[in-house]
Amino acid sequence: MQAQDPAETARRLAELRSEHRDLDSAIDQLIAARAGDELQLTRMKKRRLALKDAISRLESRLIPDLDA
């Protein structure tokens, strides 16, 4: 895996966090309205989980490796 610039990683991390936050809000609204279909809700939840995983991976890149 190629090393990336920490500033680029931080920028991407901010984008993913924003997308996750927006998707979380949309899911909450859909549930509250009880108007969405279950398939759409399931897809949104899977996307939110994928974003959370991507955020975790990027956060781990920003933590420097320390020798044990």
Image (tube, rainbow, N blue to C red):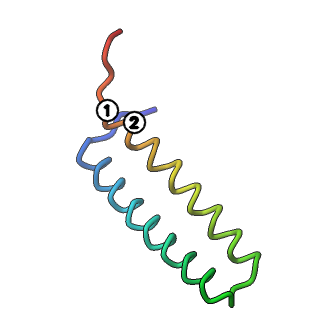
Q: Residue flagged by tag 2: what amino acid is it? A: Ser
Identify the residue at horizontal 46%, vertical 32% (top origin): 1
Mark 2, residue position: 60
| Residue 11 locus on image (x, y percent) | 29, 55
Q: In the rendered view, would you say 35 is above or below 40?
A: below
Where is residue 17? Give x, y as percent. 39, 60
Contact (Cβ within 8 Å) of mark 2 with mark 1: yes
Identify residue for label 1.
63
Q: Quadrant of residue 30?
A: bottom right
Residue 66 vertical position relative to residue 8 in the rendered view, above or below: above
Q: Is residue 36 above or below residue 17?
A: below
Q: Position of residue 16 (x, y in %)?
A: 41, 60
Q: Is residue 68 above or below residue 18?
A: above
* Disc sitting over residue 54 in the figure: none
**Residue 65, percent from left and from top:** 33, 22
In this picture, residue 61 sits left or right of residue 42: left
Circle 1: residue type: Ile
Residue drawn 35% across the image and 55% down it? 12
The C terminus is located in which quarter? top left
